[in-house]
Image: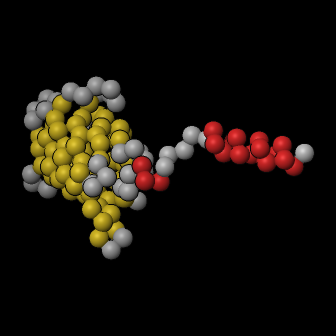
Amino acid sequence: MKKWILILFVILLASCDQTAIDEINPYSGRWVIAFKDNSGNIVREGKFTLQDNGNICSKIEASTTGDSLFFQGNVSSDGGLTGMFGDSCSVNNSGSVSGNLTELLGIITGTGNWNDTSGSTVSGIWEARRL
């Protein structure tokens, strides 16, 4: 009986679908981000989840109007971020986001440039930190 339980346990372990630790993006987790215009005013802000595979797709709200759009992108294992804005996670239709995520003394932050071309073109810098 014990032999069958052990065999069943080994089969279950072998069939589990798990992400290998070396495939998990080191920057994955929950983040807060602020998109600022060239005068330093926050134009859009929100929280997003950076998935283990490096993908991002989260709704970000406009600070002044309350409207929202999707921020979607990808972060490489070395922290390079590229992305854009859209009406959903599957529609890439306006602007661009680029920059880098870095770690210093255990604090993980990011910064870069962005522009939004959905309507009047607005651009500036973005700043983020992992929660």
Q: Quadrant of the C terminus?
A: bottom left
Residue drawn at 19 percent across, 43 percent down: 97
- Residue 109 placement, left or right of 111: right
> Which residue ends up furthest to the front in the rendered image?
3
Q: Residue at x 28, y 25 (%)?
A: 91
Indicate the position of residue 35 as horizontal and vertical percent values.
Answer: 22, 49
Tell me if 121 is positioned left or right of 54 in this view.
Answer: left
Q: Quadrant of residue 96?
A: top left
Q: Does residue 48 appear in the picture of this structure?
A: no
Residue 80 lies, with reference to residue 55, above or below; the image says below
Report if residue 88 is visible in the image. yes
Colour style of the rendered protein structure: secondary structure
**In the orientation shown, which residue stands out farthest toward the bottom?**
105
Is residue 77 rendered to the left or right of residue 94?
Answer: right
Image location (x, y in percent) of residue 72: 30, 37
Residue 122: percent from left, percent from top: 11, 40
Q: Nearer the viewer, residue 114 or 37?
A: 114
The number of numbered discs placed on residues in the rendered structure image is 0
> Which x, y percent locates residue 9?
74, 46
19 or 68, which lies in front? 19
Rendered residue at 24%/35% (across/down): 85
Above or below residue 95? Residue 25 is: below
Quarter assignment of residue 103: bottom left
Q: Quadrant of the N terminus?
A: top right
Along the viewing direction, whichever of 126 and 100 lies nearer the viewer: 100
